[in-house]
Every structure is written in C-alpha cells, then in structure tokens.
Amino acid sequence: MDPAKFSRKLWSARKQLILILAPLLLLPLLFVVPPKEGKCLYVVLLMAVYWCTEALPLAVTAMLPVCLFPTMGILPSKKVCPQYFLETNFLFLSGLVMASAIEEWGLHRRIALKVLKIVGVKPAWLILGMMITSSFLSMWLSNTATTAMMLPIANAILESLFGNLETLKENCKDKSDPEGDSQVKMHVLPCEKQVLTTENTPDWTDRSEQKNLKEVRREAEYQIKVWKGFLICIPYAASIGGTATLTGTAPNLILVGQLKSYFPECDLINFGSWFVFAFPLMLLFLILGWIWIAFLYGGLNTRLCISKHDERAAAEAKANAVIDEDYKKLGPIKFAEGSITFFFIIFAILLFTRDPKFVTGWSVFFTKGYVSDAVTGVIIISILFFFPSQRPSLRWWFDSRASNTPYVPLLSWRKAQECVPWNIILLLGGGFAMAKGCEESGLAVWIGNHLQPLAQVPPAVAVMLITAFIACFTEFASNTATIIIFLPVIAELAIRVNVNPLYFMIPATTGCSYAFMLPVSTPPNSIAFASGHLMVKDMVKTGFVMNILGILCVSLAMNTWGLHMFNLHIYPDWARPLNASSVTVATHTIAAMNMTG
C-alpha cells in the first residue's frame, strides 16, 4: 500500500487506535509502581491521554473513575459517585442558570452596546471598550457565549468604519485598478447580519480613485491590521475576565473542590475572597493586554486616535450611528430585564458578602459551616423559575374583560436545560473523583516523594515556572482537564517544599486560563479564528507576549496583595495533617526562602 494512503488511514482511525493502545502501553505501571499507587497512576494517566487527545468525549472520560476505581480496588463506588455533585458543582450550576436567564432576555446585549456608546469608536478606545465588555460579561457568562455575542457586534462596527473587508483586501493588492469586487460578502459568523445593522457602509472604492494607489494600499493594509486587533482582543478578554470570579471558569471551581478534598480545614477561598484577589489581577492584565494589542495592531496610532475633519470622521460618525440605532432598537428596559438585573445584583452581592474574610460576612447569622456559596446561588436561581416576566397587576384580578394570558416566569426549566453545559458539570465531577482517588490511594504522597529535589528552587521562581508550564500545556489541552491533572501534583509539591499550598495552586489555576497562542487552545480562540480573518501566526505573535504578561501579572499578584490576603508567607495549620505522617513540616516564610535561595 502507498505509504501516504496508509498514513491517511492511520490518521482517520487515530482515536480508535489511541483508545486501544493507550491502556496497553500504560500496563507496565502496574508492575513498576507500588500496587495501589500504581493502579491510581494508571487510571490518571489513561484519563490524561484520553483528555488531551479527545479520543473519547471529555465528559465520558470524566466518568471513567466510576468504572475503574471500584473494579481496580482503588476506591469504593460509594466514595467515588458523590464526587460528581459536590456543593462546588451546585455553585457552578447556579452561575450557569443565572447566565442563561441573562441571555434569555438580552440583558448582556444591552450592556455591551451601552459600554460601546460610552467609549466611542476611536480604534484604541473601541478595542478597550470591547475588552472591558467581554471581560465583564465572561465573569458571569461562559467565555464562549461572550465571544460569540461580541464578534458580530465588532464586525458590524468595523464595516461602518472601514467598509467591506474583502474590498480592503483587494485594495491591498498591487493592481492598476484598485476597484475590487466590492460586492464580495464577508465570511461572518452565523446570523451575524441579523444581529446588527450594517447598512450604508462607506464605498471606499470611489474614494480610492482620487488617491494615489500606493497611499490607498497603505491605508487598506493599516485598516486590515486594526480589524485583526479588534477580532483578537475579544476572545483574549473573555479568557482573562473569566478568572475574576469563581463561577467565571471551571478551573476556579476545581481549585475550590480539590482544596476541600485535600485540605478540609482550608476555608480561605470562597466567592468573595477570590474576587478581591482576582479582580485587581484581571484589571491589571486587561490593561496591559489592551496596550499590547492596541500597539501591535495600530490602535494607538495617532492617525486614528485624534479627530480629523475628513472621511475618517464621517466613517466614525456612521459607526456611532450603527451603535445608537441598534441600542434604540432594544427599546426601554423591560420589566423582565429590570428583574434579571435586580436578581443578578443580589446574586453577586450575596456571594461576595457571605464570608469575604477581610470583614465579617452575613454567614455569621447561621450555624457555622452550614451556609456556603452553593446555598446562596441555588436560593437566587430558584426564584427565577417562578418570578413573573410581566409586571403583575392587581387590576387584572378584578377586570373580567382582561385576557387570560399564560403566566411566563423569568426562566423556564426547558431553557435552563438547553443552555446549561451538563458535560462541564460531569467534567468537574471527574476532576474531584480523580483528586479523591489520588488522596486515598497514596499516589499524591508517592509523587511528592519524587518531587523533593525541587525544594532547592526559590518559591517565587517556582510560581513563575508553574504558571508558565501550565499556560503552555493548556495551549494543547482543555484548561479544565489540565488543572484536574496537575493540581494534585502541585499541591503535593508545595507540601514537600514546605510552602503554603495556595502559593502554588492559585497561580496554576489562573495560568491555565491564559491560553492565547493557538486557535485550538480555547473555544473563544476557535470562534474568532473561524471568522476567516485571522491567521495562526497572528495568534501566535500576539499570544506569546500575552502569555508572558500573564505570567508576570500572576507573579506580581501572588507576591504582593495575595501574599497578605491568604497569609502565604507562613505554612498553614490546615495543611499539616495531610503530610504529618510522612514528613516533619517546619514553618518557613517565603521571604526567608527567597533570601536563602
């Protein structure tokens, strides 16, 4: 058989081959590693291979512990199965249901257009507006939904500013006739033309006839460059924004769940304390990312930052008109939108103030340890299923001629079922089950014994190395799968080098959301790339520096306000029982270790 054809057949059957070969190739582990630890390591690595290659759907791989842990004698099923719906999963579910209610009534779209009206359409400020809006929405909605909503808005505004992108591409070519086919349609996201008004775009081909062809080409190249900057900033901002809240992205909740599994006495991380730490970090990274993207793609160029009384000012006026027109189409705030806004604010305030650590929260009014963030979230979302979407009226009860319109709540269960990604909840559960297996089997301690040489690395340097490694690994694998695989190892590493586990675990959790370099790294990156206007080299060039900026920001946060918020300079009492039998833990400060390092 022709080698080329055979290789194509192998590639087409790669998932089936991985499913069969991976368990066979990993079998030696059962004989090399101590019995119980070896069995657990076998399952963990098998799941890691399946997750990274997606040989099985991610959610199906996440359920493997239910099959393998009991049958291999690692953990009984009565301990495995409850891990799939811990209180952390309920907190995540409440965030997803709240997000589906916001999307149901279009509140997110009103917020986006309002922000863009405020910042204006100068490219640098519009990029900032896009990033602020995307990051804020992704704190509460999924990163994917945020990106899918913001990209059509960006495309419509850009068409008003610069005209049709295909026409710009024609103008970039060195041709004697700069008039390309101005009727060529853009390769846009589904339903993009139905989302925003894009009429009356300027006809640049008429103007190009009055200019020097070289100048036209230079201007068109510059405008395409700015266009790319607009498209690339949205998925990046969505990924950054998701790190600011516990419910913003799955890895944050996995951190909380694994902390409760490994360190039951640790109560430092909740919605409020995480927000106080992560929100300033998100803002810092967002500003630095904006400066880099605006600089790289021309947004900071004074040609498009200073008002001029020429055709560019007219184009900007048209773009403003597009935003204004579509905002007016939304009409006045409806009762349902106002209600969702109210419950959303209550949802955020109650989660933030339950036990923010720096002040006394409202949880003190209840029995200690009984009320968690999950309780708060479920209470609020339960109200959405019976609160009316139309303004109630007592007059209706006494008016016999009033129509008997059906009662419609703010959110129906059918809508919640459609919008909630149940596979992610299973994925969370699989991570918690894996962590429980590593703990009960002794695999975590076994790995920790082999990490002792890393004790010579100064903790501050280790933070940067961990963040960089996780950020690179998650470029090729799901960020949820990445943190599930590595968080137990990182926790054990911290214990072995006598460092507060949070000092290593928080940077790893945050770093796995910093996947900017490849289209396949995250769903938001894939959506932006699917628009057809970005190339892989654009994402690699921009994302490489974004990764470096993210690593530096996380390192700064951990060694400044994070150090004092979570008492990272001391080895905590809640981490001592886990390794008291295997090592004698001495109290060290990070500052002292840095000095000796």
Image (cartoon, grey):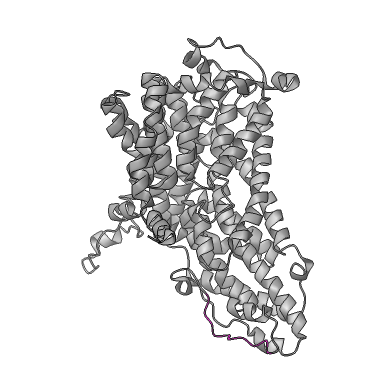
Q: Residue at x 55, y 72 (%)?
A: 156
Looking at the picture, tell me which residue is in the foreground, 16 or 458. 16
Q: Quadrant of the C terminus?
A: top right
Q: Residue 300, percent across and down?
A: 74, 62
Q: In the image, is 282 to the left or to the right of 64?
A: right
Let me know if residue 368 is in the magenta part: no
Residue at the spot 42% in from the left edge and 31% down from the top edge: 372
Nearest to the observer: residue 268 or residue 229: 229
Q: Which residue is depicted at the point 71% across and 71% down?
A: 222
Provide residue 364's location: percent of width, then percent of height.
46, 25
Give 511 or 253, whichever is nearer the viewer: 511
Q: Is residue 512 above or below residue 182?
A: above
- Answer yes or no: is residue 375 visible: no
Residue 256 drawn above or below residue 130: above
Residue visible at 63% across and 68% down? Answer: 227
Instruction: Name the outermost residue toward the front.
Output: 1
Above or below — where is 290 with respect to 199? above
Classify the position of the N terminus by image quarter. bottom left
Residue 478 location, x and y as percent?
Answer: 47, 45
Q: Residue 139's spot in the image, x, y percent?
A: 52, 48
> In this rendering, does residue 294 appear at all?
yes
Q: Camera-side residue: 270 or 86?
A: 86
Range shown magenta: 177-186
From this view, report whether residue 237 is shown above or below residue 456: below
In this rendering, the count of numbered labels is 0
Q: Quadrant of residue 153?
A: bottom right
Judged by its main secondary structure, the magenta piece is: loop
Q: Is residue 322 left or right of residue 123?
A: left
Look at the image and say whether residue 184 sits in the magenta stretch: yes
